[in-house]
Amino acid sequence: MTPDSTTADPLTIATVGVHVLDIHVVGIDSIPEGSDGALVESIGFSAAGTAGGTALVLSRLGATVRTHGAIGADPIGRSLTALLDAEAVDTRGLVPKPGVQTSSSVIPVRPNGDRPAWHCIGANAQFVLDDLDPGALDGLDHLHLGGPEFLGGPVSAELLGRARDRGISTSADLLSGGDPGLLEWIGEALPHLDYLLPNDEQTRGLTGSDDPADGARRLLDRGVGCVALTRGAQGALVVTGDDVIAVAAFPVDVVDTTGCGDAFSAGFVTGRLRGLDLADAAELGCAVAAHVAQGIGTAANSYDLTAIEAFRQSRAAD
């Protein structure tokens, strides 16, 4: 099946969890000494986070998206909300928390594309399940949990279990770097996931395995239905109980990899909900990530599902 944004029934997806305002400073060679200054190429900001960034990309790919999380009652939160509103994301589920700032990151982008970051956790740490509207799951095709480590395993399991009981498919992505303690912390949530979408470093940290396929199998052993992990320039690896599927990355001139993981998640989930098999869904995810990598931040470049599908099919024609 080929996704067709003009004829397929619209998808309704909710993203829940981490929302961040990313501030990108492009052209950083070094931090000035003392109170000295330096000129840079540009300074900009974009909506991000494993829930916020994924919501943005899902909306561009044609889904009706509702997003839920915690922000501060501050200018950062208003800016983040405005950016998501402009992408047609329903932001009524973003709950302002008094006395705490909206989560944000300052990301100096070096000329070689490296992107270290300063990050403030802020309001993301205060989001609780009671912040969800009672009708948050109504009418959903899919629920994506961005950052289950912030809710913890038992609470994440409760939310994901509610979704699964209503026939809603589920996915999750991590924000934190992986370690065995984190795996135990979120362990109760894993059997309620159709798809876990980590990167290779997180998989290695969670499981202790240097072999991505072996690490993914260890996560399957904890109850996950399917692990689709990103591998940077090596593309993606999709692992189920029956298959190990490697998908190559698209060769593009990389400007900034911020948001590529969220872009892959949105593309992969969209592909699966549109009826693509695992390999094609992962390839769709890689195609979206390639578009994002060619600009600055999650909102980089302009695209929709039709454009991404044409880009994906162009590789088959080469």
Image (spheres, rainbow, N blue to C red):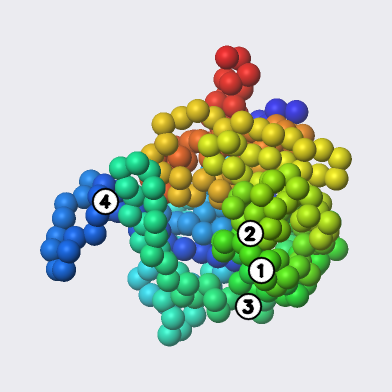
**In the orientation shown, which residue stands out farthest toward the bottom?**
99
Sequence-first tag of 4 and 2: 4
Task: Give the residue at x 63% y 78%.
Answer: 128
User: Callout 4 environment at 10 Å: few (<14), some (14 to 19), or many (20+)?
Assistant: many
**Alpha carbon distance from label 1 to label 2:** 9 Å
Q: Secondary structure at mark 1?
A: helix
**Alpha carbon distance from label 4 to label 1:** 33 Å
**Quarter placement of the C terminus:** top right
**Alpha carbon distance from label 3 to label 2:** 26 Å
Label 3 is placed on what type of residue?
A: Val
Q: Which residue is mark 1?
A: 182
| Residues at circles 1 and 2 in contact by the CB criterion of under 8 Å | yes
In this rendering, which labeled residue sits more in front, label 1 or label 2?
2
The spot of residue 184 in percent (x, y) is 73, 70
Q: Which residue is mark 4?
A: 28
**Residue 231, label in figure:** none
**Alpha carbon distance from label 4 to label 2:** 29 Å
The spot of residue 111 in percent (x, y) is 30, 42
Label 4 is placed on what type of residue?
A: Ile
Q: Which residue is mark 2?
A: 205
Q: Secondary structure at mark 3?
A: loop
Q: Secondary structure at mark 4?
A: loop
Label 2 is placed on what type of residue?
A: Gly
Task: Give the residue at x 52% y 51%.
Answer: 56
